[in-house]
Image (cartoon, coloured by chain):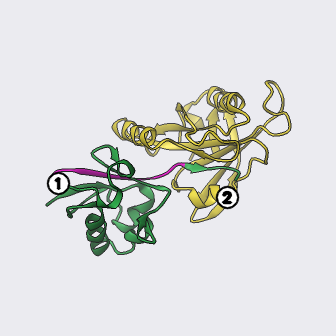
Amino acid sequence: MLTIDRATYDAIIAHARRDHPDEACGVIAGPAGSDRPTRFIPMLNAAMSPTFYEFDSGDLLRLYREMDDNDEEPVIIYHSHTATEAYPSRTDINLAGEPGAHYVLVSTRDGADADGTPIDFRSYRIVDGEVTEEEVRVVERYTDSSIPE
Amino acid sequence: MAIEVRIPTILRTYTDGERAVDASGDSIQALIEDLESRHAGIGERLLEDGEVRRFVNIYVNDEDIRFTGGLSTELSDGDTVVILPAVAGGAR
């Protein structure tokens, strides 16, 4: 299960809508081992494409260095699909390189790029080519009891 | 010649969980051969048809080797090499 606070959840959706029809992407970092996504880091989609996303290689290095320095890890890696469902594509599965991360997909298809419309927000684990969908629990804020077990 | 190589999470199965290992070589090509000799299997995860895989990034002292000569990028004692899988995907 992914537990995420409302502000971060909303920020991911806002980013996906802002970049529509291109795919949006980013990371929510959190303290290593906590499974708690706390630091929202929208990334530039260097591919600037409606069907592909890729972090710029320089941005990627800076991001990982920063997380290392802060003793953080990528708790969530998110991106949007802008014309298809919020489910990992074959490309997403082949390229998933963080077995410990929650892969969040948001779909802005069928008018969901407009503010205030319903939007699909789903989360998956992707390990060794295996996709497992998981429940998403949105909390107003993190408390001790919202620490995932 | 000792060069520190930072290993990403997904490849730590080849390094007994180590986040960084020492390796040697006067070029990235030689370094990868040395890594493979110590951590069998890792080479194939980095190379395909004799080239660095499209979705693997390798940096020498913070420079992406795509811009410094690829596999022939020269290395000196004390250099730091970072390996990071691309974060990429999409509906395509």
Q: Is residue A104 above or below residue A70?
A: below
Give residue B76's mark. 1
The residue that appears at 57% across and 44% down in the rendered structure is A77
Q: Position of residue A101 (x, y in %)?
A: 54, 49
Quadrant location, the N terminus of chain B? bottom left
Secondary structure under the numbered disc 2 in the rendered image: strand
Identify the residue at horizontal 60%, vertical 61% (top origin): A94
As drawn, the residue found furthest toward the right would be A110
Residue named by callout 2: A132
Residue A140 x/y as whole percent: 66, 26
Q: Which residues are magenta?
A: B77-87
Q: Amino acid at mark 2?
A: Thr
Q: Nearer the viewer, mark 2 or mark 1?
A: 1
Q: Residues within 10 Å of mark 2 (few under 14, many from 20)?
A: few
Q: Residue at the spot x=14%, y=54% of the render?
A: B77
In the rendered image of the structure, the colour used to display chain B is green
Q: Is residue A93 above or below residue B80?
A: below
Picture quarter containing residue A45? top right
